Image (cartoon, grey):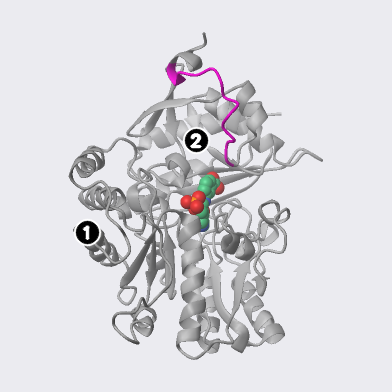
Amino acid sequence: MSAMQATSGTNNLEALWMPFTANRQFKKAPRMLVAAEGMYYTTDDGRKLLDGCAGMWCCNAGHARPRIVEAIANQAKELDYAPAFQMGHPKSFELAARLVAHLPPGLDHVFFTNSGSESVDTGLKIALAYQRTIGQGTRTRLIGRERGYHGVNFGGISVGGIVSNRKVFGTLLTGVDHIRHTHDPARNAYSRGQPEYGAELADDLERLVGLHDASTIAAVIVEPVAGSTGVLIPPKGYLEKLRAICDKYGILLIFDEVITGFGRLGAPFAVDRFGVTPDIVLTAKGVTNGVIPMGAVFVKKEIYEAFMTGPEHMIEFFHGYTYSGNPMAAAAGLATLDTYEEEGLLTRGTELADYFADGLHSLKGLPHVVDIRNCGLVGAVELEPIPGEPTKRGFAAFLKAFESGLMLRTTGDTIAMSPPLIIEKPQIDFLFDTIRGILQTLD
Ligand code: PXG
């Protein structure tokens, strides 16, 4: 019996249809994680892996953090579940109040979901319902961006801009259009932080206003930094411009901060990092340190208040989930915030950003590297694809990293890094030294 069989308790991997995974490849050569603490995972054969991507961009405070573990255990004993509709429990209100204190003034109401995908669909629905509520019911069109990732529900893949996530799922939502993406390696390759060129790409929204008319457009949704399509940092001035165009035409601006939220960019949110305040902020992942599924959608006061009309016994917004703000997630969220606050993690990325960027950009010139991008504690190394076999080189890098004691994410042929915000400098050295070694031996 292999070590994997011994620890996983099964030698039958067949039943599980794994998400976003090459199932057949995995089942031939499984990569099993059996434990995690601090910055490290443990594999079933007893190896330690440095977590180079905070799980999947979610465990911002690292793993097995005592406050969070204890809070969940206690909560399960005290109040395991409470109905979310027409009933409440104190911790969801407490978490809401504490969370909004971390957002810029004005973004002071929050709706709980259970994932990033649900936060996206919730945000889009709020935008549509809000426009109708304020007498702008012709505004039904949603605008996304090419190369955007907004989860996998129908709303999210409709406004998203990743072809493989869209092409086999029929007609998606109607009335959706996309602005151009901002990736421009010809002008911006190897930028440290925000690229210099491309603010004018925000004008593409003007093109869509010209095509559809502003009176048909409810909202624009973008990731401030696009994560899943390879860490695309917004050019200087781009987000400001997008905000100005939205203001000009009465279009709501939605930031999908599922990845950028909770300290990833060195500031609590991208909103703070870039100084641009949207009307709706979508989060998930870091809200509970990835430990219990939860998402949170922040909206401006005017949006919440627009719904608070009509007879008081009536439900104001016909939307919600069985597990919205459930006690286990709320307890995890509160303990996560305690941890972030006590350890200064929501801004720790700023202290480490230069060291991280130095290590990352030292990879320039290694074989196959065509671009390097960074912001806060997010980094990406883009590799030239093997001709005719896109993604193969990226996947090979991921597998070699796993064998070398490092867990990374690759998206296409781009290696993405987003370590837990508790990372120390020697671990940053290990991260980049390992990648350097991999790139020197990669076909
Ligand atoms: N919006 C954004 C911006 C995301 O990055 C989602 C929505 C969806 O979240 P859920 O919780 O429904 O998965 C995401 C998720 C990767 C990677 O390595 C990225 C995500 C998830 C898993 C892997 O690129 N982002």
- State whether residue 196 is above or below residue 70: below
Badge number at residue 432: 2
Q: Amino acid at mark 2?
A: Phe
Q: Nearer the viewer, residue 422 or 96?
A: 96
* Neighbours of disc 2 within 10 Å: few (<14), some (14-19), many (20+): many
SS under mark 1: loop
Residue denoted by label 1: 89
For the magenta stretch, what is the residue range? 7-19
Instruction: Kindly tell me whether residue 276 is visible in this rendering.
Output: no
Looking at the image, do the residues carrying marks 1 and 2 touch, with CB atoms under 8 Å apart? no
Looking at the rendered image, the quarter that the C terminus falls into is top right
- Per the picture, the main secondary structure of the magenta-coloured stretch is loop
- State whether residue 358 is above or below residue 185: above
Badge number at residue 197: none
Residue 77 in the image, given as x and y percentages of width and height? 19, 40
Q: Nearer the viewer, residue 310 or 215?
A: 310
- Label located before the other in sequence (1 or 2): 1
- State whether residue 103 is above or below residue 251: above
* Residue found at the very far front of the displayed protein: 313
Q: Is residue 65 magenta?
A: no
